[in-house]
Amino acid sequence: MSPRRDMNDGRDDRLEALLRNALHEEADAVAPAGDGLSRIQRRVGADRARQRWLRPALGLGSVALLAALGVGVYAVTNGTTGKDTIVPGDVTQTPTSSETPEPTPSETTVPVATDKFPRLAIFPFTSAEDEKTWEQAYADGHEPWKADPTAVSQFWVNNYLQQPAIDKVISKTLAADGKSAEVTLGRTMTAEQKKTVPVTVVQLVQYGKGWVVVGAADAAAPPYQVTVATPTPGTTVRAPLTVSGPGGFGVEESVQVDVRDAASATSYGTGVASFGNGVPTWSVDVSFRQPTGPNGVLVATEDSAADGGPQRLVAVPVQFGEGSGTAAPPQFFYAIKNGRVTKFASRNGAAIDYLTDPQPGGGAEDPQLSRDGKLVYFLQNGGTCVNGLMSVSTATSDNTPPTTSVASPDAGYVITGYSVDSQLPGETRYAFFEQACDSSADPQAKLVMLETSGSRHVIKYHGLPPTIVGDPSYEPTAQVQLIDAIVRTGTSGYIARYDDVNDNTPTPQRHACPGLDPNDGQPEALEMDASGVLYVALQTGSSMDVVRCGVNKPRVVFSVAGNDQPADVDVANDGSSILLTDDSGKVWRWDGSGNAVELSPSVPLTHVTW
C-alpha cells in the first residue's frame, strides 16, 4: 500500500469518527416533523441510486458534512515561531512542489446546504457579522484573498500562526457542493536533498462569499500523526490547561503546544510534551495569560529532527472566558523624568533608573521602545526649532549609556510624532511627521518615510489642517511600508492608512480602523502590537476608551471614566497589556481583563512605552 493511500485511510478514520460525533450532536437538537419517516424512506431510496463514494474522497466528504452541520474538525499544527512575511494577493491553487502530487479523485458527495455560521470558526472571521462586513468591502475589491480557500490557508499559517517556512501548496481538495475544502501545505526541507514535504492539512468551510478555517490536521500518514485528544474542539479553556494526545510512535518525540488568539498573531502561552519509546499518551499543562478576546486556537507542532523545521502542525479551535488566563504585564516601562529617559516599575510606576544624562535644550520627550526591547527611541530638543530622533540602550549600566543620533528633520522643521519599525532582519524603518517653524513656509508639514537602505518617500501638507495627531504606527508588513495615523481634518479625525508607494495625499481614502464612528469619540492616540492589531485611545466626553480595531466595529477593551483627554497609549508586543496616559500625566495599566489600574509615579508622565 502506497504512503498516499495510508494517509487517506488515516484521515478517513479520523473524519468518520468526527462525523459520527457531529451527527449525534446535531441529532440531539432536532425536533422530528410529522412526516419524518416518509421523508427518510424517500431519501434512502434516492441515496441507493447514487454512485458509491470513492474511498480516498471520504475524508473530504466528511469535512463537507461537518461544515454543513456547523461542526469543525479538530486538528494539530506543526511549526516554529516566525514573523509576518506575506500579504496574499493572487495565490495559486495548483501544487507548487517540485514533485507532482498524485491526482486527487473527483468528489461525488451529496451536497448539504446550510446558512449557519460555523460554530468552530477560527480565521479570518469569527462571526457572521464579520463576514458580512467584509463582503461589503469585497464588493469594492478589498481583500479578495478571503474568497479563496488556498489564500486564506496560506495567510493564516504564514502570518497568524507565524510559520513562514510552510510556504508550499501541495494540494487543494474541494467538496462536490463547493462548501468545504482541505488545503495541504508543506515546505522544502533544508536537508534530505531539499525535498518538499507536506506539513498540515487546513480544513475550511465556506460561509457567504468567504472561506473560514475550522481546524488543521497533521499531514503525516498514521500511525505517525500528532493529534489532540483533549481539549475537544470548541471547549472553553482556563489556565493551566491540560492538553493531551495519543503517542505510541517514535523514540524521542516532542510536541510544542501554543495557546493563541484567533483574531491576531498573539501567543498567550506555550508548553512542551515529550514522548516516544511506546509511551501511549503525551500530556502537558500550559499556563497562559488572560486573552483579549473570546476566540482562540490551540496549536500543536513538532519539528523535524533532520533540519529543525516544522514537520507536523495541528490546530483546534477553543473559547476563552472571563478570567480564563493569568495576567502578566511587562515588568518595566519607560518614560521621561526630569528631561531624561527613565526606567519605571510597571507594578506601581516607581522610577528605577535613568538611561540618559540631562539632554540639551528642552530635554527628552516621546520615548518609544523597540520591538526587541533593546533600544529606547526619543526626541531630543536642541533649542528653538531644533530637535532630532535619538536612541539609547536599555542595557543595565552603572553609568548612563551613550545616545545615538538616528534621524533629523529638514532645516526649518521639527519632528512632532514618529514611529520606528525594526521587525525585518537587517532593516529599520522610520516614519516621522515634521512641521514647519515658519507659518509662511510651504509645505507646512511633511510625512517622511525612510529606510536604512536609503529609500525615502515624502507626503507634503501644504496647509494645516489636515494634520497628524500624536505618533503614527507601522503595520508589520514586509512588502510595503504601511503606516496608520490619526488625521485631524478640522474638528474631527479618522484613522488613515498610508503607504510609501501609492500615497501622495495627506488624506488617504483607506481607513485603518473600519467601523470607527465619529460618535464613538475623538481619536487622540494609537499603537499597533507586533502582530498587527491596532488599538486607539478615544476621548468620548465622559470617559477615555481604548478600542481594538478589527474587520467589524471596534471593540472597547477598557474605559477610564471622566472627561480627561488621552495623551498616549502603548501596547505590549503580544497585545495582552496596555498603558494609557492623559494630558495631565496620569498613568493607567490594563492587564488584559477587568478595569485599568492607576499607577502612582512621582512626576506626571504623558508619554510611556513598554
Image (cartoon, rainbow, N blue to C red):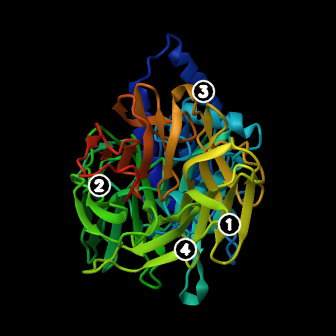
Report the residue at 30% width, 64% height from top.
343
Q: Are marks 4 and 1 in contact (CB under 8 Å)?
A: no
Distance from the alpha carbon under mark 4 to that under mark 1? 14 Å
Quadrant location of the C terminus in the rendered image: bottom left
Q: Residues within 10 Å of mark 2 (few under 14, many from 20)?
A: many
Answer with the quarter of the image where residue 133 lies: top right
Let me know if residue 359 appears in the view: yes
Let me know if residue 534 appears in the view: no
Report the residue at 75% width, 54% height from top.
441
Report the residue at 77% width, 43% height from top.
141
Question: 582 or 179: nearer the eye?
Answer: 582
Q: Which mark is residue 406?
A: 4
Q: The disc labelled 1 sits on which kind of residue?
A: Asp
Residue assigned mark 2: 329
As helix, strand or loop, the secondary structure at mark 3 comes to helix
Nearest to N terminus: mark 2 or mark 1 = 2
- Outermost residue on the front side: it is 384
Q: The disc labelled 3 sits on which kind of residue?
A: Arg
Residue assigned mark 3: 43
Residue assigned mark 1: 410
Question: 207 or 373: nearer the eye?
Answer: 373
Instruction: Please state if 49 lies on the left or on the right of 570 as rendered.
Output: right
As helix, strand or loop, the secondary structure at mark 4 comes to strand
As helix, strand or loop, the secondary structure at mark 1 comes to loop
Instruction: Please state if 242 lies on the left or on the right of 303 as rendered.
Output: left
